């Protein structure tokens, strides 16, 4: 079993260029959180993803997430599933060299429980 990484909110993953894919319900949730219409949110903060199969968040000129402000995520309470899943359910090559998440050996049951708890706390909003 690979280790479970406990996020330290260092925002290294937010500074890595790439696609943060958005699901329809995430667009709705983030737009509402920002007090924007979905159309305005899409126009201001999204682009067609690299596979041309959906929308992704835009990036700042340095490649970091458009919602990263200093060391804080502007949309933390409603951030996309892809962001919540990092680094345990997805990551990028070499993430261990930049990410400060603390690896911890856990059983498969603990791993599933931690992922489930993280997702449940998000969906209670």
Image (cartoon, grey):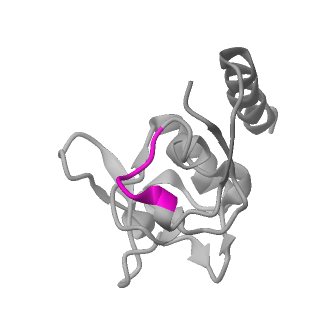
Q: Foreground: 91 or 29?
A: 91
Which span of residues is magenta-colored?
90-96
Q: Residue at x 41, y 53 (%)?
A: 20
Please identify the quadrant where the C terminus is shown.
top right
Left or right of 6? Residue 16 is left
Looking at the image, residue 45 lies above or below residue 96: below
Residue reaching furthest top?
109
Question: Residue 73 at what x, y percent from top left?
Answer: 65, 67
Left or right of 49? Residue 32 is right
Q: Foreground: 56 or 38?
A: 56
Question: Residue 60 at what x, y percent from top left?
Answer: 41, 79
Q: Main secondary structure of the magenta part?
A: loop
Q: Look at the image and say whether residue 81 sits in the magenta stretch.
A: no
Looking at the image, residue 117 lies above or below residue 52: above
Please identify the quadrant where the N terminus is shown.
top right
Q: Residue at x 35, y 53 (%)?
A: 93
Q: Look at the image and say whether residue 93 sits in the magenta stretch.
A: yes
Marks counted in the figure total 0
Where on the picture, by quarter, is residue 104? top right
Question: Residue 75 at what x, y percent from top left?
Answer: 66, 61
Where on the picture, by quarter, is residue 18? bottom left
Where on the picture, by quarter, is residue 10? bottom right
Q: Foreground: 120 or 85?
A: 85
Question: Residue 19 at what x, y percent from top left?
Answer: 34, 55
Q: Residue at x 50, y 52 (%)?
A: 38
């Amino acid at each position: 079993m690979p280790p479970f990484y406990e996020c330290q909110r260092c925002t290294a993953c937010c500074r890595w260029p790439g696609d943060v894919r958005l699901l329809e319900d995430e667009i709705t949730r983030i737009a509402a959180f920002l007090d924007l219409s979905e159309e305005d949110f899409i126009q201001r903060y999204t682009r067609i993803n690299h596979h041309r199969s959906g929308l992704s968040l835009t990036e700042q000129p340095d490649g970091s997430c458009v919602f990263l402000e200093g060391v804080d995520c502007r949309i933390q309470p409603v951030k996309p599933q892809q962001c919540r899943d990092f680094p345990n359910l997805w990551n990028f090559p070499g993430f261990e060299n930049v990410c400060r998440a603390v690896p911890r050996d856990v059983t498969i049951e603990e791993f599933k429980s931690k992922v489930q708890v993280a997702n449940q706390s998000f969906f209670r909003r």
